[in-house]
Amino acid sequence: MSVDVTKLDNGLTVVTEHMQHLESAALGAWVKAGARNESQSQHGVAHLLEHMAFKGTKRRSAAQIAEEIENVGGDVNAATSVETTSYYARVLRDDVSLGVDILHDILANSVFEREELEREQHVILQEIGAANDTPDDLVFDLFQNNAYAGQPIGKAILGTPETVSGFNQKDLQDYLRTNYRGPAMVLSAAGAVSHEELVNQASKTFGNFDSADSPTPQPAVYTGGEQLLKRDIQEAQIVLGFEGRAYHAKDFYASQLLAMILGGGMSSRLFQEIRERRGICYSVYAFHWGFSDTGVFGIHAATGAEDVGELVPVILDELIKAAENITTAEADRARAQIRASMMMSLESPAARAGQIARHILLYGRPITVEELTDRLSAISTDRLRDLAGRLFSTSNPTLAAVGPVDNIMSQQEISQRLGVQAANAAE
């Protein structure tokens, strides 16, 4: 497999990976703009735009969009995240041109008809209600909001009922025109696809997007914070986090490796100590989310009311131990897990198309598995222990919890237990 990259005159990048023996292709348009690129008054517009892209264009009705792609056995979908939005399709090799045409049509020619807009606003209000009724979704919204208090990067992607209900056609057009520009877009495809043919079609379609650079979003400032939401439910959903590392930071890959060691599987420290030895929760794992200029390192766990008081202190003990005694065997196992995950993704055209698109948006070029493996191999256990010591003792913790949370350790107590400097803990 080889990756081919071409940049169009307007700055849009076309990237493909031909995968032999496949009869289908996954393709999509990735935009370096998401919820973070919204202004205060635009909260939720990026997600609404993603929905409205399928609700009719100058050439196709909403029904025709669905019928044309499904007439050939394909499918089309989209997703909004903090920093990106993606629109993607899966088709057979002979229908790649149709997939590209539909993707271009929904991004360049959507009409945002008023009746469709009102209907979709109502759908998203239901989606917001469902998220608020789902504690393990809600707790992550609370967590992000407190990690980046008062900033677009910390706000829930769905928006609020008030903001979503207030959007009109012009709001959608303004956000699209401002952020969906050539230099911030990637057309990516993997599977049974010809790079030359895709470039030719993209030049005639996506080549019409504005060539100016998109505005740079507001710089992120990690703040930390606490929000406990009492709910009459059986389990407490808890997320504890700290300032992590941005994609381009020196310790980004070391942070990914540390998250795997602490809570990346059944052999991880948190799972073994909390689930296997103590039996005080059903689910516990660690994660590290990187963004363009910041990151968060966190632990999610769910437990019953009777174990809430014990859970967080045990987590903190494991974080403290990580700064003292990470072993070579643990680091090697975590490296193997990450490498296997990367290798397995190469077998999925959809995963691969998304992966190389994100690489282009983040790094400006595709990153090979070999390069990623070399970066991981260069991380020593001493460096991991040093990172653990710095991550958990030099930033204001973020604590979010939903459910029976009366007995949970407070953010201030967490800071004291970890030895967080008083100046940081008070911010």
Image (spheres, grey):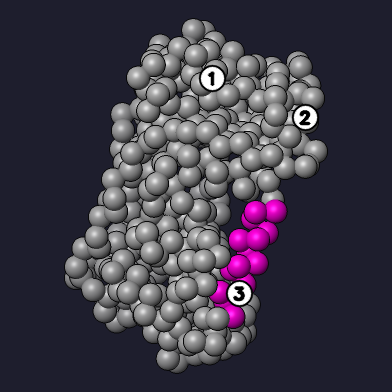
Q: What type is the residue that disc 2 sits on?
A: Ala
Residue under pointer 1: 414
Q: Which residues are magenta?
A: 119-133
60 or 172: nearer the viewer: 172
SS class, disc 2: helix
Q: What type is the residue that disc 3 sits on?
A: His
Magenta-colored segment: predominant secondary structure:
helix
Q: Residue at x 63, y 77 (%)?
A: 73
Q: Residue at x 42, y 22 (%)?
A: 425
Q: Within the image, what quadrant is residue 30 found in?
A: bottom left
Q: Residue at x 45, y 83 (%)?
A: 112
Q: CA distance from mark 2 to mark 1?
A: 19 Å
Task: Tell me, yes or no, whether the highlighted magenta stretch contains residue 125.
Answer: yes
Residue under pointer 2: 305
Q: Residues within 10 Å of mark 1 (few under 14, many from 20)?
A: many
Residue under pointer 3: 122
